[in-house]
Amino acid sequence: MKHKRFGIPVAVTAFVATLGLHAATAAASSCTDLTQLSLPNTAITAAQDIPAGSFAGQANLPAFCRVTATLTPTFDSHILIEVWLPAAGWNGRFEGIGGGGYQGGITYGNMGPPLRQGYAVANTDEGTSSSGCTALYCGQAGNKGNPTAIAFGESAAATTGLLGHPERIKDFGWRAMHLMSVRSKEIVKAYYHRPAAYSYFSGCSTGGQNALMEAQRFPEDYDGILAGAPAHYRTHNHLVVNRDWLSATAKPDSPVSSAQMTLINNAVLAACAGQDGGLKSDTFLTDPRDCRFDPKVLQCTGSNAPPSCLTQDQLATIQTYYAGVSNPRTGELIYPGYSRGSEAAPIGSLGLVLNEALPEPAFDGFFYWVFGSQFGDLSSAHNYKNFDYDHDVDTVDKALAADLNATSTDLSGFKKRGGKMILFHGWADPLIPPQGTINYYNAVVAHGHHSEGGEGRDDDEGNDGRGGSLSSTQKYFRLFMAPGTWHCGSGPGPNVFGGAFNQGPNTDADHSAISALARWVEQGVAPEQIIATKFVNDSPAAGVAFQRPLCPYPKVAKYKGSGDPTAASSFACVADEPDYNQKPAPRYGP
């Protein structure tokens, strides 16, 4: 079984994939000579010529030079990086790959695809391996014998993650990815005797946060950035997951089963499929914000009983799921909830079904960095069951926001040096609410508008106002919403459209996201659409089920009224009507 590294599919045992790897060749080569390379605060631990074939669970790789290094920018830092350099056929480009969850190791599964396409590629453990972190856990009270927690790799012993290691928190939040980028490009230059002509970054989830952090803080690192489903407002993203767990475990019949998630999803589709230019036969929603489905219609009455209906407590769980998290004292929205149509049944989707099955909230490790081991002690003043969504939010923000949240709307440095960025998010994401990404994008548009002296509105109406902020922003930064896509991939919609984390046979074509980004950077051709593919049973070998264009937000893909409904050419990107987007109170924004 595959599971997800905070949304990026990898084998559960990927972090130990270095066992049994090829030994370095005895003879010196331009690769093995890299062990002599001297770089600041860097120890190159290995430089190996890897023959073509299989390596670290990746098949059909070309021959490459594998470089591993440890970076120690501070006394407490221990950042692992890995760089793969094509032995032949290098396309002159470098690609940095983002992390997933708390990372805790190198994500080999995301390095293979770019290497096959001729990129020199790098990844990092984000400096968390030395603290015993894994992708899903970096502080927790122990699995308590819970089978789901055990299956997802949670240890029996309690840990506090990065508590007491402020430098490692900085490494995880922003420094590791920046230094990986800088040192890797120096290694690329040393190996090929010339620098990369272009540098790109791709990442999803934590990788999306990495991507935005790079654009905001280190605009000189990359020419093009592909950022997906970003955990950019991490201190608030996790509040939603924590609140959903509390709701789903409040009473014995509060948890919503997989079968009931399917029941809800089917009812949502029956009520709302086909809106905003989609087809009535779609098994996903084009823009869920137009859906007004009320789950109360599924409440059990008379002789009806679960799983064919919802109890009153289960209804409260799903209503909380849609509502997001608010300050209980003021009523202010802190972070949006999940979209209708995101009711994912498989536990591997990392959604509600997984969360409610765990002994404590999913991905709550960073709360241990603030409150310590007492966060796992239910008798303490601060724990995962009595978290105060009024005062404790400020406590967490004060401790972590400066290093973990990639929320700056000032991208002027990235724009000035000619950088280009594609941001995407799946509308059916059951882990990171997509409306939060829209809020961030709208805030960037508004920031650009205000800096240009205009008075446009912070909404999704495509309103240029007097400063033309949307059109100005889209000259270097575009958002694409992916209908029916779960967290960083999978889902009922067209969910494959390119990037190291989102691969399929169509990703070598000119219409993939990474190719669209390269064309934008290198040829100045901005992407007017990105073709997304849905494979039969999500298996490329089974063939294409249908394709559909992803459109630059706020446009949506609308069926032209004739033509093959499975062909992307039968849809056009058109302006959408204004839609209400759940937006946090100003002090919790953007």
Image (tube, rainbow, N blue to C red):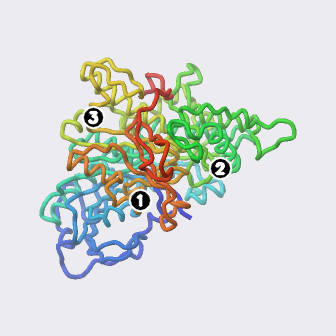
Q: Is residue 228 left or right of residue 390?
A: left
Label 3: how many Cα within 10 Å (few below 14, some 14–19, many 20+): many
Assign the N terminus to one quadrant of the image: bottom right
Nearer mark to the viewer, of 2 and 1: 1
Mark 2–mark 1 Cα distance, whole angstroms, equals 30 Å
- Of 542 and 380, nearer the camera is 542
Residue at (46%, 40%) from the top-left corner? 558
Mark 3–mark 2 Cα distance, whole angstroms, equals 40 Å
Q: Is residue 392 left or right of residue 320?
A: left
Q: Which residue in the protein does label 1 denote?
A: 503
Q: In the rendered view, would you say 80 is above or below 554?
A: below
Mark 1–mark 3 Cα distance, whole angstroms, equals 28 Å
On residue 21, the disc is: none
Contact (CB < 8 A) between labels 3 and 2? Answer: no
Quarter of image, res 319: top right
Q: Which residue in the protein does label 3 denote?
A: 411
- Give the amino acid type for the residue marked by disc 1 in the picture: Gln
- Give the amino acid type for the residue marked by disc 3 in the picture: Leu
